[in-house]
Amino acid sequence: MIVDKTIPEKPVFVELSDVWVGYNGKWVLKSVFLDCRAGEILGIVGPNGAGKSTLLKVILGLIKPDRGSVALFGKKPGKEARLDVGYLPQISNAERTFPVTALDVVMMGIYSRIGLFRRPGRKEKETALDMLSMVHMSEHARRPFGVLSGGQQQRINIARALCSNPRLLVLDEPSTGVDSVAQEDFYLLLAKLRDEKGLSVIMVSHDIGVITSHADRVACLNIEVHYHGNPESCTSDEVMEKVFGKNLNIMVHDSKCATCHMKHEDV
C-alpha cells in the first residue's frame, strides 16, 4: 500500500488495523489499515464490489471482522460509540417515494437519542427545524419527501443525520441519483459543516473524480487499500491500475469548471 506521510496530527476518530472480512470462503477485505481524523473529509473510492459498503459496516460495528481491530472514538464500535455517528446508507427508490414530509424524515434522526417509543416534544421539533434551516431546506419542511429533487432529498438526509449531534458523518454513495449541479452544492455543504462545526466525514464512492475534488484525504480500495493519503497523489498509474484496472479515464473538476460555478435555486 502507498501511504502519504504528510498526514496532519489530529485526534483519530476511526482506526482500522489489519482488518480482514470474509464471506463464503472469500476475502472481501484484506489487511486494511485506515484512519479518519477529526475535522477532515476522508473519501474511500473503488469500483463496484471493492468492499466499500462492507468497510463502512465494519467501522460502524455492524460487521465484526474475522481478523484485526477497529476503534471508533477510541472504543470498540457499538451502540454507544454510534451515538456520535450520523450514517447515510445508499437511498433506494422506495425510500425516495415514501409518503412522509421532509420534516418527518428529519425527525427520524431524533429517535436515536430519545428512543423509538418516546414521543418527540416541542424541543425535538425545534431541533429538527434548526437542522432544516442549517441545510437551507426550511421552506420545504411540509412538502412530501418524494416530490423533492435528488439534491434536496440528500440535504434532508443530512439534516436527519445532524439531529443526533454527531461528530462523524458516514455516507455511502451520497451522489447516487443526484445531478451534477446538485452534487457540487452537496459537497460544498459538507465542507461548510466540516469548517464551521468541526464535523468529520467518511464518504465512499466509485467516482474518483468527485472524491479527489472534495476530500481532504483519499483511500483507494479494492479489497485491499492500495493508497491512503493526499488526493493529489492518488491518481498515479500504479495506484489506478491496482484499484480500477487499465484503460481508466479520470475527469476531475477544478476551480474553472463551469459546473462548479452553477447554482440551482431548488438544491
Image (spheres, rainbow, N blue to C red):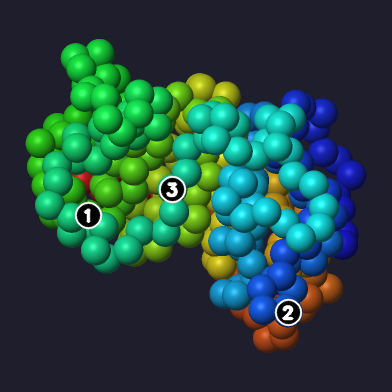
Above or below, comparing residue 142 to residue 257 in the picture:
above
Q: Nearer the viewer, residue 143 or 94?
A: 94
Judge the density around disc 3: few (<14), some (14-19), many (≥20) Cα neighbours within 10 Å.
some
Q: Which mark is residue 141?
A: none
Visible residue check, residue 248: yes
Mark 3, residue position = 88
Where residue 117 sits, quadrant-wise, is: top left
78 lies left or right of 166:
right
Q: Does 73 appear above or below 35?
A: above
Q: Position of residue 62 (x, y in %)?
A: 57, 51
Q: Which of the marked residues, 3 or 1, is nearer the chain's N terminus?
A: 3
> Disc 2 and disc 1: Cα gap in Å?
42 Å
Q: In this rendering, would 160 be left or right of 193?
A: left
Q: Residue at x 82, y 28 (%)?
A: 9
Q: Does residue 176 appear to the left or right of 229 in the view shown?
A: left
| Element under disc 2 | loop
- Disc 2 and disc 3 in contact, CB within 8 angstroms: no
Nearer the camera: disc 3 or disc 1 = 3
Q: Amino acid at mark 2?
A: Gly
Mark 2, mark 3: which one is toward the viewer?
Answer: 2
Q: Amino acid at mark 3?
A: Leu
Type of amino acid under label 1? Ser
Report the front residue among 148 and 240.
148
Residue shown at 47%/37% (left/top)?
86
* Mark closer to the chain start, 2 or 1: 2
Separation of marks 2 and 3 at Cα, in angstroms: 29 Å
* Residue matched to label 1: 149
